[in-house]
């Protein structure tokens, strides 16, 4: 694990050089650009320059960012394959008075990446966790899609197998919110085809790819038209975020018991049974007590 000394705590913006201020021992969750390196925040740059240890998903990717801002620190690999060994070393370093900055390959750490394991471990050890916010592909896609109104649900990556993928979509289809998915370029076309079947052909959807990069594309259409646009493509070039608009006014209130059950299952993924029943009651008009007992029976 490479730890920087005081002489290395410099960073560069354009032709100007700066000395980073010292950091207190803590775990710093630092957002990095999702494509355009110019989207790095000033606070994020200084945090990386000042940190004793920079933990990252892929050292090759992170070195490009660090070199852009004249940060000479050697990054330390922390990813899903070595988290069991690397995590305790990072925790030990902080307990010994070091500052650790955690970054991912792109965007905000912990959102669909291995950092989600490190933060609970730090909390359990009594370590302060400091967020250093910045770029997020979820928020970038939502704002560019035109489909975000009052609320959204981030569903991460869909299952790779079609049966499991459609079951997941069934759970989410009645939520009165925009839905945000990450998707592999290899599966985006088939995922859209499944969404036509589950959500219906007219529901609005947006495919956002290469966000903040030179070939950025944000295409918002009814799902059937969006699926037709990419039908037959084995691979959509670039990173993909899919946004599905909320159900229409004639769709968003579940009418059948099966619809209610799907809604309860989806809500219970992120809420306690009592809160899920309460939210489902608000959305369906059914009594909260009845829905609570129904959810317990489903579980």
Image (spheres, grey):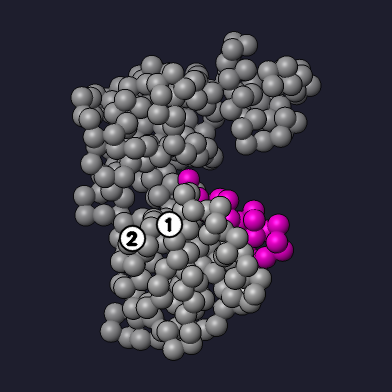
Q: Is residue 118 magenta?
A: yes
Q: Which mark is residue 61?
A: 2
Picture quarter containing residue 89? bottom right
Q: Which mark is residue 3?
A: none
Outermost right residue: 289
Number of numbered labels in the structure image: 2
Marks 1 and 2 close (CB-CB < 8 Å): yes
Quadrant where the C terminus sits is top right
Q: Residue at x 23, y 25 (%)?
A: 231
Residue 114 placement, left or right of 95 = left
Outermost bottom residue: 7
Name the secondary structure under disc 1: loop
Q: Residue at x 49, y 20 (%)?
A: 167
Q: Nearer the viewer, residue 266 or 160?
A: 160
Q: Nearer the viewer, residue 138 or 27?
A: 27
Residue 233 placement, left or right of 157 = left
Give the CA distance from mark 1 to mark 2. 8 Å
Q: Residue at x 31, y 50 (%)?
A: 211
Q: Residue at x 44, y 18 (%)?
A: 163
Rendering coords of residue 265 (x, y %):
61, 24
Rendering coords of residue 173 (x, y %):
50, 24
Name the secondary structure under disc 2: helix
Q: Is residue 81 above or below residue 161?
A: below
Residue 266 placement, left or right of 139 = right
Q: Which residues are magenta?
A: 112-130
Q: Which mark is residue 57?
A: 1
Q: Is residue 183 above or below residue 64?
A: above
Outermost front residue: 85
């Amino acid at each position: 694990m490479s730890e920087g000394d005081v002489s290395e705590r410099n960073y560069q913006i354009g032709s100007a050089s700066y000395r980073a201020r010292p950091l207190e021992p803590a775990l710093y969750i630092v957002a990095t650009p999702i494509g355009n390196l110019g989207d790095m925040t000033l606070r994020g740059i200084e945090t990386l320059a000042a940190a004793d240890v920079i933990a990252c998903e892929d050292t090759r990717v992170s070195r490009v960012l660090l070199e852009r801002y004249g940060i000479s620190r050697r990054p330390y690999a922390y990813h899903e394959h070595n988290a069991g060994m690397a995590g305790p070393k990072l925790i030990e370093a902080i307990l010994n008075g070091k500052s650790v900055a955690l970054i991912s390959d792109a965007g905000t750490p912990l959102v669909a990446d291995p950092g989600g394991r490190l933060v609970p471990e730090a909390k359990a050890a009594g370590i302060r966790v400091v967020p250093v916010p910045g770029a997020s592909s979820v928020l970038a896609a939502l704002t560019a899609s035109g489909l975000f109104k009052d609320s959204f649900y981030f569903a991460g990556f869909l299952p790779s197998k079609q049966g499991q993928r459609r079951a997941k979509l069934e759970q989410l289809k009645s939520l009165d919110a925009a839905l945000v998915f990450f998707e592999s370029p290899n599966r985006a076309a088939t995922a859209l085809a499944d969404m036509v079947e589950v959500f219906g052909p007219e529901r609005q959807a947006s495919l956002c790819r290469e966000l903040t990069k030179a070939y950025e594309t944000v295409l918002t259409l009814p799902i059937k038209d969006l699926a037709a646009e990419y039908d037959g493509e084995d691979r959509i070039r670039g990173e993909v975020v899919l946004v599905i608009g909320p159900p229409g006014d004639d769709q968003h209130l579940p009418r059948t018991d099966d619809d209610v059950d799907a809604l309860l299952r989806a809500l219970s993924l992120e809420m306690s049974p009592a809160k899920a029943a309460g939210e489902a009651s608000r959305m369906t008009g059914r009594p909260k007590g009845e829905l609570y007992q129904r959810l317990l029976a489903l579980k």
